[in-house]
Amino acid sequence: MKRTLLTLLMLMAPGALAQEMRAVELYGQDELLSMIRANTHLMRVKRDDCQLVQDIQARADVLKLPAYQFLWADMKLYGVCVEKDVQTGFDYLRLAADQGLPDALEQLGRYYLEGRFVVTDEAIGLRLTRMAASLEHHRALLTLARYYADGEGSPLDYPEVYRWLHRAVFETEAERREAEQLKNRLAQQLPPSVREQTRQAALGR
């Protein structure tokens, strides 16, 4: 009986071990960027049982891939699968932004606008958000449009954002409706001649 049970356990062990030690593939760049846009990147790292921490850090540190610098930044900022270290996390977020990653520029700008981890600085926040919006980051564009529709920021930048709103193609109906409302509000901040000239330029006429 004992021998039969032992044999059964030995036969079952490899499969059970393989299931327990399942290999987790590293995320591709496009896949990671999609997760970042959907704000599911940290949940995915936790769901993968924190198996990829060293690989993620290597791609942020050695290969200096901006999407992985962003992921490593958030892991350090919020203590996901690693010891929380806000300073290091913010440094990596800046590195990703310095490489022109729109998501990093948007998040860094949002943190300065909200005063999260840093002292609130609207000028810096709007500048970073505008940079992200110029790279077709729609969340940044909507944030910028909200400020400008309220008369904040430099009026010299209003026509450009008005043109971006005309040209943007949104994935969700909710975003499209908000963009439409903001475009109409922003139009009220522009002289009629500038408004029409900008609209024609946006339509390629």
Image: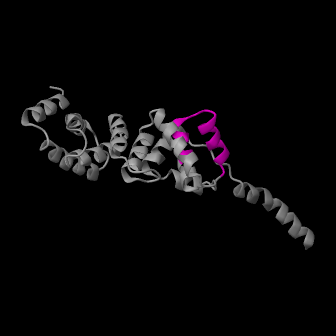
- The verdict on residue 52 being magenta is yes
Start-end of magenta stretch: 51-73
- Extreme bottom residue here? 1
With respect to residue 122, does 155 lie above or below? above
With respect to residue 29, does 23 lie above or below? below
- The verdict on residue 61 being magenta is yes
How far across and down, in percent of the image, does residue 58 sit?
A: 65, 39
Total numbered labels: 0
Q: Quadrant of the N terminus?
A: bottom right
Front one among 18 and 165: 165
Query: Does residue 189 appear to the left or right of 17 in the view shown?
Result: left
Magenta-colored segment: predominant secondary structure: helix
Residue at 50% from the left image edge and 42% from the top image edge = 93
Residue at 41% from the left image edge and 38% from the top image edge = 102
Q: Quadrant of the C terminus?
A: top left
Front one among 188 and 142: 188
Query: Does residue 168 appear to the left or right of 120 in the view shown?
Result: left
Front one among 201 and 30: 201
How far across and down, in percent of the image, does residue 133 sit?
A: 33, 38
Q: Quadrant of residue 161?
A: top left
